[in-house]
Image: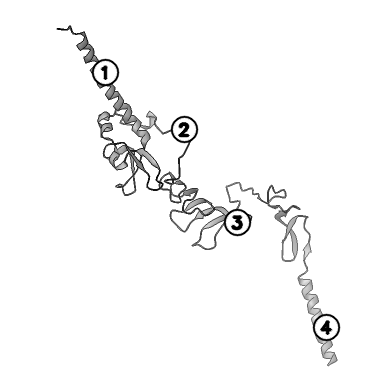
Amino acid sequence: MVKHLSLCIFVLLCSVGILSGQTEITGRGAKGYLAKFTSRTTVGNSNVFQTPAGDVGVGTATPGGRLDVMSDFGGGGPTVVVENANQFGDDAIDFHSAGAFVGNLGMITTEQPTRFFILHNSDIPAMPLTLAENGGNVGIGTNLPTNILTIRQGAGDAIADGWVTYSSRRWKTDIQQLDGALDKVERLRGVSFNWTATGKPDIGLIAEEAAAVVPEVVAFESDSKDARGIDYSRLTALLVEAVKEQQRAIAELQKKIEEMMQQPSR
């Protein structure tokens, strides 16, 4: 019994010794670097570095922030990849302040068109900025931009030092002077109204009415039937020619009055 037990202990100790020899790990790393296996039994440095202050650098030993990722891709390769393993999910990076969610940015892939978004707190569907693929439509305050730039209706006034419209002769053909401008202006109807969404009082034209007179300045929905809005700046050309027509009529009347004043009284 004693011999049998001693044999078992000897075999066990030999096994431990053999296993210990097989799994012995060698190598050394440098201070601050996260260790990584360079082979099954050796350890070296990885590309991840942590400073004494807790800043982490990937590819750099001098991180400039809490997380600094540096790459040297010469062909435009990715520096960081964010991927949702769920093909039916969206990709996003969240931002928190003192434990509370304050916003995120990411890609909406579960809806069409696929679009990049910047979200503040919980303002869906009125996202501050949306960039849709297939044309790059940009939305401010809306997550479904229908035009190259769409600002949500009722979001407030946009302000800028200037807005320039393409207008050079180089890009135009079949140039003709507007005819009957004064008649068209007389057929337009200026109105005052309140916006349905905000109740804000305003003045302007009715797009459907304007389309019957100067369809060139009216934008329509994709069905080409329902009016969407008016490019008021293009009405300037109509107003210029209308004023010129009116001025010609005034000049003719002045000439007739002068001729009547020069006639001898009877």
CA gap, disc 4 and disc 2: 91 Å
For this rendering, which residue is in front, 2 or 187?
187
Q: Whole-percent x and y of residue 164?
A: 44, 33
Q: Which residue is mark 4?
A: 10
Quarter assignment of residue 23 = bottom right
Q: Which residue is mark 3?
A: 100
Q: Earlier in the sequence, mark 4 or mark 2?
A: 4
Residue type at mark 2 is Gly
Marks 3 & 2, CB-CB < 8 Å contact:
no
CA gap, disc 3 and disc 2: 39 Å
- Image quadrant containing the C terminus: top left
For this rendering, which residue is in front, 169 or 98?
98
| Number of residues whose C-alpha sits closer than 10 Å to that of mark 4, classed few (under 14), some (14–19) or many (20 or more) | few
Identify the residue at horizontal 28%, vertical 40% (top origin): 209
Identify the residue at horizontal 23%, vertical 18% (top origin): 253
| Number of residues whose C-alpha sits closer than 10 Å to that of mark 3, classed few (under 14), some (14–19) or many (20 or more) | few
Q: Is residue 94 above or below residue 244?
A: below
